[in-house]
Image: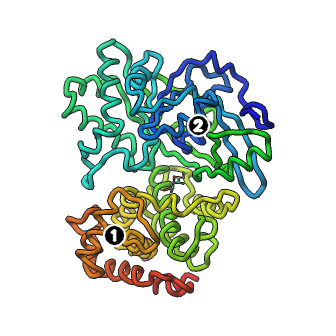
Amino acid sequence: MSILAGSAERFAYDRDAQAVGIVHLGIGAFHRAHQAWYTDLALDRGDCDWAITGVSLRSGDVADQMNPQNGLFTVTERDGAGERNRVIGSIRNVLVAPRQREDVFAALAAPGTRIVSLTVTEKGYARKADGRLDFDLAAGGFYPLVAEALERRRNAGQPGLTLMSCDNLAANGLQLQQLMTEYLAQERPELLQWFEDACTCPSTMVDRIVPATTADDRAALAARIGVSDEAAVFTEPFTQWVVEDRFAAGRPRWDVVGAQMVADVAPYESAKLRLLNGAHSALAYLGLRRGHTFVHEAIGDPAIRPLVEELMRREAAPTVAAAPGQDLSGYADSLLLRFANSALNHRLAQIAMDGSQKIPQRWLETLAAASVEGRRCPAILTALGAWLSHVRGDNGPVDDPLAGTLARLWSEAGMSGIVGAVFGRSGVLASEWTPDAYDCGEIERSIAAKSLTHPGSLSPHLTSLN
Ligand code: CS2
């Protein structure tokens, strides 16, 4: 059985004739089901020389899965109606940065490379709580790689690059530009002017739910369509990509295959981070403590669903300055349907990871915007309590770069001090929102309700919603 032997749909272009135009840093399942999928469709519509070299920044697992398959892999879309499979040809090869540093520099500095895209997760940007760069963490990530490539390009008189963040951060392009500038200012100040003049960092809103692939998924694929694929990814039929159209040296025609190229991504990005991702994190922490495993189970729980609706419709949506024609109520409706997709088996534990890096843009920005308007957000406060209980270890081991710090704060501050120690003015997640006595009370009630057994126990405010 080979990847091209089965009955999946596939591209018609000549892969060997495509030069690499994109180097992607952080080649996980999400990139494969999203940007690589769009690029494959664009190549199929006649675009040329936008093949992708993927780079793993840490482990060699993806390279070991993909390189023996010549970069080919399948994307399977799943919902209640069944499955649709496609073989994707846009990824040429995968490099592993820790063991192939020179090859990574060569790929980034190659004249044909015009876009460097990133899905390195929130923590990959090495931001401190105040948004500035943590140089110790940055040294082990993508910054030195990109800086060296920029230097080589500038010295060789080559064109600049587009650095395109595809991570779930607010104003991801602007943040990347500011952090990269901070890095260069300290490490390679001679490059600053060229970076500013020749490179761009457009913002993007990326959306597609991509659960981690399991061994059972791969076995089922082989049994069903006769494809043996170590790099298979499984996702929902829905996909959205909104991109700020500001590229230093061209781009594939992603717009022809469904991406929205716009002047300002902010309204789409705020809606997505605050409604979709905000609801996701709430489902994760509330769902785990009620004993659920998957998103579709948590959204089907009558003790949780009204809270998630409240969070999206009454708390997050009013804080989003919608673009003309953007329908936030319809968006919330569609999200509820997407969360209920039981064919996906999207694990709550996957979403619960790295909460300290996700909560600021998912919840704290909503809280800050709502408090300016004098509005309370009991659903988010309840979710915050569930997160604090999660990082105390109530649902088992905690997977978060701040896990140690948060555990220490719990033992030092205890129940009466934890909210201030985390969210207060000098807390580890200090933000523009500072909790007042009401907020603290709501959050503490939620922590105390840690084993939720009936709908009414979520929060006094939320019982009225049932
Ligand atoms: C999720 C996201 O894991 C998480 O934190 O909320 O990965 C989510 O599935 C995507 O952003 C959907 O586009």
Circle on res. 247:
none
User: Looking at this view, is 5 or 171 the one in front?
Assistant: 5
Residue in the image at 52% along x and 75% along y:
307
Quick check: 149 left or right of 458?
A: left
Circles 1 and 2: CB distance less than 8 Å? no
Apparent side of residue 77 relative to residue 324 in the rendered image (left or right) = right
Q: Position of residue 50 (x, y in %)?
A: 55, 24
Q: Which residue is mark 2?
A: 65
Q: x and y percent of residue 319 in the render?
A: 42, 62
Identify residue type, mark 1.
Ser
Residue labelled with disc 1: 371
**Is any part of residue 317 visible from this angle?**
no
Query: What's the residue at 55%, 44% (across, down)?
Result: 30
Residue 377 percent across, percent down from the top left: 41, 73
Q: Please, what secondary structure does the residue beneath circle 1 have?
A: helix
Q: Residue at x 58, y 41 (%)?
A: 34
Q: Quadrant of residue 361?
A: bottom left
> In x, y percent, where is residue 149?
35, 24
